[in-house]
Every structure is written in structure tokens, then in C-alpha cells.
Amino acid sequence: MPVGRYARPPITEAVIEFRFGSPLSDRMVKRFLHVVAKEYPTTEQTYEISAQLRITGPGQNPEVSTNQSLTGYKLTGQDSADFMIFRVDRIGIIRNSPYCGWNNFFERAKSYYEKLKKISGLRSLTRIATRYVNRLDIPVKPGDLVRSEDYLQIEPLVPTAVPRLSAFFTTFRGIVPEIEGQVIVNSGTVQSPLIDHISFLLDIDLFREQALPQRDQDVWDLLDRLRAQKNALFESFVTDRARELFDRA
Amino acid sequence: MPDIVALGRSAQQPLSASAVVDPIMSPIERPSQGRAEGSLYQPQIIPILTGAEKLESDLFKNRAELKLLTSKVAMHLSFEQRQSLFLSIDRLLAAEEWEDESYEIDLESFQSFLRFVIHAKIEHMPNIGVGPGGTVLAGWHAKSKSVHAEFFPADHCMLMIKLQSDRGLERFAWRGHVARLRDVVFHNGAIECL
Amino acid sequence: MPKLNHSTIPDENHVVRRCGHQVIERDLVSNDVIGLFPKSMQLRVDKNEKYLSMNLLEHCSGSKKDRLKAVVAIQRSKAATRLSLQSGIAVIDAKRIRKIGSEHKRTLTVRHTPNSGDVSYSRVSGLPLDNGDELLTAALADEAYQDFMLLYQVDALPE
């Protein structure tokens, strides 16, 4: 059951991520995968694949070269709502909808961080992030028009020469002094998965890459502050009319 | 970095509503799913299931994709609805029951089914099966009435209603858009099934 | 091998339809079998089917129980993969098939069409090739469910 301020939070994906300054060894990676196997019974290896074409001369067939490298692992939980992205230099704990509430999500992330630290020893952190991808689903009758500013406080500034939009997408990056970090926000229209709805994406990626704490308790305190700031940002980006959608049972 | 000028409210016209909006190819990376597909210039991240035979791997992929589709709309489903869907998916796509005539569930058919469930605000989740080609089959029963539906891609569906009237057994068949399905069931006297 | 003759199955005989586990309707809560989806009696358009595949029950000898076990053995021998114990077989009266067809203004033929791989093989023909008559196939599915068993139940029948 979702726990939080809203009856139906619009969260489609929530992420807590830690990045490390020094990579983990193969032995450490395998050990960690073994430790979490019960909670994440399915493991996929992720490969980065790239291809290059080189034109050697006019009329010549291009030379093709490909490169494939193991980048890490994607772990899937029992109900396919919990995931983990695990690489030698980072761990991302992911929860898809339905969101389980901050306390539950935070405790899980904390638990996996502690397990990893037990295996790998103290590793300096280079990035701590929380990222929440939200989707606002707005019911509309066919033919109705929707004003994005009725739901979102983010909108593109468009000259009147373009009187109507059928879609938009914005992205910006800014400094957030309250957490000595930054935020990347993506927002815009997305294809709605629901009948007779229009949907807006609101993706808030809040992170800190400098002066990172190393003591565990300080890391948890920072995560709590990231969460509080993420909530404050979210509330500043949506309108009361949008909030009514999340509270509707 | 210069301060970003606060965005003022524009006088732009409202967005056009549509049941199907052109998808935006957003450049964002979805954390659990890797980078946006289709880019020729960015390296692709491909997950590969380890330690499983092909059938298990294929069925795992099908189950995972269906559950991922469900998660995208899970905020509109109750806990019980989601649980019952997942139990059905696991049962219908179990490797140990797989046969020559078994089919993976078609994602687009499943999407039509999910869109119907949420749009119609049904009270009772149906019994679920899989038709040839991977279409989703659904069945509801109440007293002497039954409703069976088959869901196809692009929000198409087929409906069969059976009920006992004073004059004997009656059956109705209908094809159309999933958004109309509930109304058709209602107008043909079988809404208590849903 | 002598030529295998095709013949019309008499009214008093029966055909057996195999139903995969995915077209068997199970109650969501109890998981009990409660029927067959109408799809169980439709042609597989993706496989370009022109008729419903069946087995002639009376081709096999013995009691009904013996015949059912024999039919299942034939089906198992033809399958590329193992048959799920949660799949099933439905026994349908040839006369009832023809009657349901005529009630829906269709002439359904029920014929014994043995081949070297299966001498009990039979066919029900006359259904629309695009499955356009849903009422017909729903009626056939209801009829099929009147005498239906799961494979594990057939296996458990005493010898």
C-alpha cells in the first residue's frame, strides 16, 4: 500500500543512487550479487554495445567495427517493481510504481548500501542522488483543451506566432543551495497510457557531487535532506489542481 | 553560471487533448530501463539474462515486460488488482506448463486490456487466459450471466455476453473500442458481472 | 500401408478436442476450472487453420476411460513438447456439433481423417475461416465443457 502525503502519488519511478571513487573488484561484485540474490532473484548482465562505420574511400564498402563490454548488472525483484542497477562504481536502488513510501524505500537503500560496504570496505562517495520520475495523468473529454499551467509551473516560453502546442519538452539544470547540490528537471508531455487522458512528465533528479559525507549517519542525513528538498521542489512545480488528482481515491 | 530568468506565464493556447498523443522521444535516461531506444550515436545498453535456457529467458522477458507495463499505471490500480494480474501472468507464462500451442502474451493486447480495466473502473477483476496470437482473454461470471472478452492491439476488443432470460438462453456478440465495452455490457443487462 | 479412408463420423460417435491450459478458464480466487474460453473452439488464424483438429474417441477400444487414456497417449506422442497436466480434453457428441452448426445456419462436417501419424485424427470443418461467428464458437465451447477433464485427472483414472 502506498504510504505518503498523497493517496495516489504520481511517481512512476524512484531512484536512490550512490557512486564511488574507486571501482569494486570482481570478487566484491560477485559476493554482493550472491548476498542480494534472495531479494532479487533475476540477474541480467548489461552490455554496452557500439558500432562504428569508417568510410575508406569513394565507392568502397565501409569498414565496420563493433565493441561490446560488460557494464554491470540489472537485478529484478520478485514483483518486478523493485530493481537494482549495479556497476563497479555505482549502485542504484529503484522502485517502480506503486511507490512504497519514503521510509520503506530509504530503509531498503540503506540496507543495501550497508551490505555493500561490509563487502567492499570504506569507499569514498563521489555522488549521492535521489531521482523521482512523476507522471501527471489528467482526465479530459475528447476534443477538450488543456492548459499546462493549470497543472505545472514549468512551461516553455513560446511566441504568439505559435498559438497552440500539441506537445512540449523542457529540461534545465540548476543549483540548489539548500543541499549544496544541483537538480536536473525534465518536464513535458508524454503519451498517456490511459484512455481520455493527457499526461505530463515531471522528472526531478537531485544530487550532490562535492563535499560528500563519508560517515554512514551523515549519508543518511543527507538523503533525508535530499528527499525533503525534492518534495519542496515537486510542490513548487505543481498546482493545487494537480494535487487534487493525486489525492483522488 | 548565470541565474535562470524565472519563466513567466505565457499567453499560449491550451494543448489539444487526444486519447493518443504523439510520443515524445525524450532524451532522458530511464534508470531502470537504460537509455532511450533508437539512438544510433549513443551506445546501447542491452540486458541479457544469465543462466537460463531460451524458453525460460523468453518467458521471463514477457512476464517482465507485462509487469513493467502494469507498473506504469499501477497508481490507478488497487493492490488487489495488481496482485491478481501478476498471479495470472505468472500462471499463464509458467515454463513448466508451456506447450506447443502456448503463446506469449502480446504486449499491445495487454495494454488494451489494462486501459479498459482503468477506464471502466471495474469492480471485479476477470479470469484471464491467452488466445492464439497472444491476445488477452477475460471472463466474468455472476449468477447465471457471463461476459467474455478478447482484447486486441490498439484498443480493439470483442465481447460475448451470455444470460438466461424468461425466454431462454441469450447470447450477444459485439466488437468495438474498449472504451465502449462497459456501456455495452450495461445496456445488455450484465453489468453485475463487471 | 493400406490407404486410410476418410469418412463421416456418425451422430452417435464422439470427437475429443484438446484444450491448452491457456484457454481453460479458471476462477481468479479459487483457481478452480469453471469453463472454456470461446477461443478454445476457434481456428488459429495465425497458423492458417481451416478446421478444428480432433480425435475420434470410438477409434480406440475399451471403456470410455480406456479410450480417453488412449487419446491422451496419441496426443502426447504427437506433441513436440510435454503436454501440461493443467491442459485438458473435451468430449463432444458429433450430433451436437452438427446441431449447433445448423442453429447458427452453418453446415459443420465432422469427419474421421486418419493419417499415418494419427489414425484417430478427425476434423470439424465449416467454421468461418476468419472466426467471424463468435456466437457459434461460444456455443461450441459451452458444449465442449459439458464433458471436460484435465490431463492429470485422465492420468489418475484407474486402469
Image: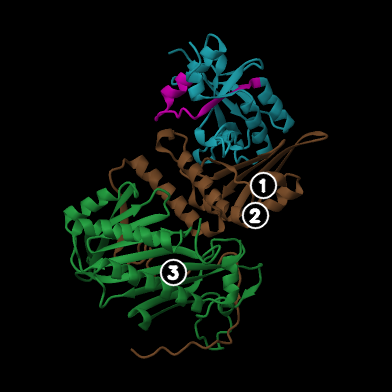
Of all chains in the rendering, the one displayed in green is A
User: Is C73 in the magenta?
Assistant: yes
Disc 3: host chain: B
Identify the colour of chain B in the image: brown
Please tell me which residue is depicted at 60% across the width and 29% down the height of the picture: C125
User: Distance between the Cα atoms at labels 1 and 2?
Assistant: 9 Å
Please tell me which residue is depicted at 18% across the width and 60% down the height of the picture: A121
Residues packed near mark 3 inside 10 Å, few (<14), some (14 to 19) or many (20 plus): few
**Which residue is label 3 attached to?**
B25
Identify residue type, mark 1.
Leu
User: Is C111 in the magenta?
Assistant: no
SS of the residue at dot 2? helix
Residue B173, above or below C10: below
* First reached walking from the N terminus: tag 3 or tag 1: 3
SS of the residue at dot 3? loop
**Which residue is label 2 attached to?**
B120
**Which residue is label 1 attached to?**
B194
